[in-house]
Amino acid sequence: MDNEKLITGLLSYIGEDPNREGLQETPKRVLKAWKHWCRGYGQDPKEILKTFEDGAEGCNEMVVVKDIDLYSHCEHHMAPFFGTASIAYIPNGRILGLSKMNRLVELYASRLQVQERITTQIADAMFEHLQPLGVGVVLKAKHMCVCSRGVHHTNSITVTSALRGCFKEEGAARSEFLALCR
């Protein structure tokens, strides 16, 4: 079946007239939007996470990027969820361009997701490709499948975390990271 016909069928299913003037271009726009929202499937985190030794000399303290915008769609209802991510790492001879953490969030968010998985994917990619002493990731998101259907709880926020290396093994590093995320 033609992709535009799928969207036309959905419009009919919900009780709309797909031939109505305001909806005539909707199938093309919907397909274009979903192509954009799911662009992360064609991306590889290793291409994003290029590291540098230059600038890493003596750098053994925590590097944190907070409040990274997060926008994704849940794989259960294809409904949006959105919020922020905070990522930290402790360099081990190599550093990462700061915007690369934002790009990593965007890569994994641009797929159908569950918040638990995206959190661990970000942490695992950072830990594998950067090989730092530790990595911490905290995601805070509002899920439209919770807000707009089912329980209709519009104020609830889901918080997930993933810790690797010294962030998991050492209480002081974990506490410092979590305090910085507040």
Image: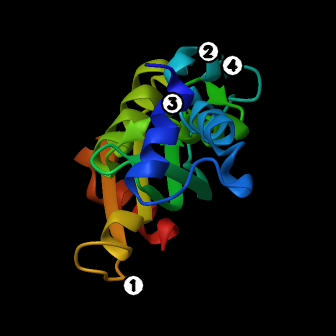
What is the number of the mark on residue 53?
4
Residue at position x 31%, y 58% in the image: 160
Label 3 packing within 10 angstroms: few (<14), some (14-19), many (20+): few
- In the rendered image, residue 85, in percent from the top left (x then y), is placed at 51, 55
Pointer 1 residue: 155
Residue at position x 58%, y 23% in the image: 93
Of labels 1 and 3, earlier in sequence is 3
Pointer 3 residue: 5
Of labels 4 and 1, earlier in sequence is 4
Q: CA distance from mark 4 to mark 1?
A: 44 Å
Q: Kindly identify the amino acid type of the residue bearing the numbered disc 4.
A: Glu
- In the rendered image, residue 49, in percent from the top left (x then y), is placed at 60, 23
Q: Kindly identify the amino acid type of the residue bearing the numbered disc 1.
A: Asn
Pointer 2 residue: 47
Q: CA distance from mark 1 to mark 3?
A: 36 Å
Residue at position x 60%, y 30% in the image: 35
Could you say which quadrant of the image residue 40 lies in? Answer: top right
